[in-house]
Amino acid sequence: MEQNYKLDKIRDLSGDDQEFIETLAITFLEEVPADARLLKIAADSTDYLATYRAAHKMKPTIDMFELGVLEDLIEVQDWGKNEERGKDISAQLARVMDAVERAANEIKIDFNL
């Protein structure tokens, strides 16, 4: 449990309310993997605005669940925001995608979802 994500911030925020924590876990599974797919599609097609928007939307949840890739996600976001045409963000994007997949798989198991 909690190898690819952490619940410390969520526990602090919720006062360790298990119902609230489970609701956030369900929301994570409903939104973050789909947002990550959109992020990858946008970045792969060099759609800077869509990349920025997807990364920006994901940031609070990635931070709250402490996936360990917030800095990578910010780099991807900034690439889109600043239209950094000469910069290769494929490694950062791959780390974000991998972290989301690992966390989603673990959350499904940990919460029996």
Image (spheres, rainbow, N blue to C red):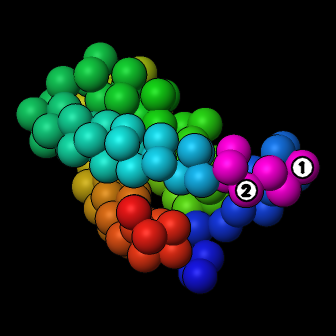
In terms of depth relative to the viewer, which is nearer, 54 or 91? Answer: 54
Q: Which residue is mark 1?
A: 15
Q: Position of residue 58 (x, y in %)?
A: 47, 37
Q: Provide the residue span drawn in magenta.
A: 15-21
Question: Is 80 positioned to the left or the right of 22 in the image?
Answer: left
Q: Is residue 35 visible in this depiction of the protein?
A: yes
Q: Which kind of residue does numbered mark 1 sit on?
A: Gly
Q: What residue is rendered at 38% in x and 39% in y?
A: 31
Q: Which kind of residue does numbered mark 2 sit on?
A: Gln
In terms of depth relative to the viewer, which is nearer, 98 or 84? Answer: 98
Name the quadrant containing residue 77. Answer: top left
Compared with residue 92, is residue 79 higher up or lower down, i.e. above or below? Answer: above
Compared with residue 104, is residue 36 higher up or lower down, i.e. above or below? Answer: above
Question: Is 86 positioned to the left or the right of 81 in the image?
Answer: left
Is label 1 in contact with label 2 (beta carbons under 8 Å)?
no
- Look at discs 1 and 2 and give the one toward the viewer: 2
* 85 inside magenta stretch: no
Q: Is residue 86 visible in this depiction of the protein?
A: no
Question: Is 64 positioned to the left or the right of 54 in the image?
Answer: right
Name the quadrant containing residue 59. Answer: top right
Q: Secondary structure at mark 1?
A: loop
Single out the residue that lies furthest toward the left: 45
Quadrant of the frame with the C terminus? bottom left
Q: Position of residue 72 (x, y in %)?
A: 49, 53
Q: What residue is rendered at 56% in x and 62% in y?
A: 67
Q: Secondary structure at mark 2?
A: helix
Q: Which residue is mark 2?
A: 18
Disc assigned to residue 95? none
Quadrant of the frame with the N terminus? bottom right
